[in-house]
Amino acid sequence: MNSRLVRIALACLAALVLAAGIAAYQVRSERQSQTASRFDMIGGPFELVDQDGKTVTRDSFAGRFVLMSFGFTFCPDVCPTELSQMAATMDLLGDEAERLQPVFVTVDPERDTPEAIGQYVRQFHPRFIGLTGTPEQIATAAGAYKVYYSKVEQDGGYYTMDHSTFLYLLGPDGTTVDIFPYGTDPEDLAARIREHMSA
């Protein structure tokens, strides 16, 4: 093969590589755009209180990914299962978990004081942050993330809380980038979170 044919072949190869790169970039950009449009109405500013009594807002987590769930400390099964899955996801992420902050927001501020929620979340993972606040603050945060919750009276003066069960992944800029249904396997959670971290 003469040098002219070699140059043509190399030029064609370079063009194919460039075209493949452009196509991959367009697909990735389209996926990111679709993801953004799916969740752009979910999430928003909030002001709550952590287990140390400090005020926390969405901006407090700027620069980090946040995996957030809503529930309550008296929850008999769903919340403990979900928090255990979040903790397992943190372990699976290894060193990458440093970029992720797990957060648990109560929908039962009447019972879930900063001290109570702190004791609760520490049972699952040392990196967990528990958030509570006034009923109005909780309503604002839950409303922003389209979280349903309702107090259900029981016999003997007791009550429980009905609530929706989703995990919300916030990006470093505080926007919602993904939502996971209850029962999502930790391996799947870790894989999806890695995808967002590498995007």
Image: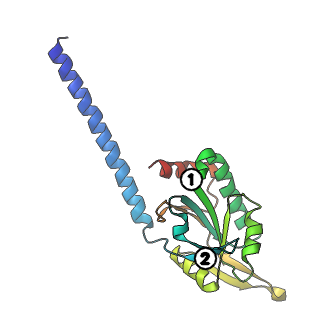
Tally of numbered tags: 2
The secondary structure type at the circle numbered 2 is strand
Q: Is residue 117 left or right of residue 30?
A: right
Q: Nearer the viewer, residue 130 or 38?
A: 130
Instruction: For the residues labelled 2 and 1, say whether their Cβ atoms are less than 8 Å apart.
Output: no
The image quadrant of residue 148 is: bottom right
**Residue 48, which numbered label?**
2
- Please state the horizontal and vertical placement of residue 154, each as a whole percent of the image: 78, 85
Q: In which quarter of the image is the N terminus?
A: top left
**Residue under the point 26% across and 27% down:** 13
Q: Which of 48 and 52 is in front in this view?
A: 52
Q: How far apart are marks 2 and 1 (CA)?
A: 22 Å
Q: In this view, does 41 lie to the left or right of 30?
A: right
N-term mark: 2 or 1: 2
Determine which residue is flagged by label 1: 99
**Residue under the point 60% across and 59% down:** 101
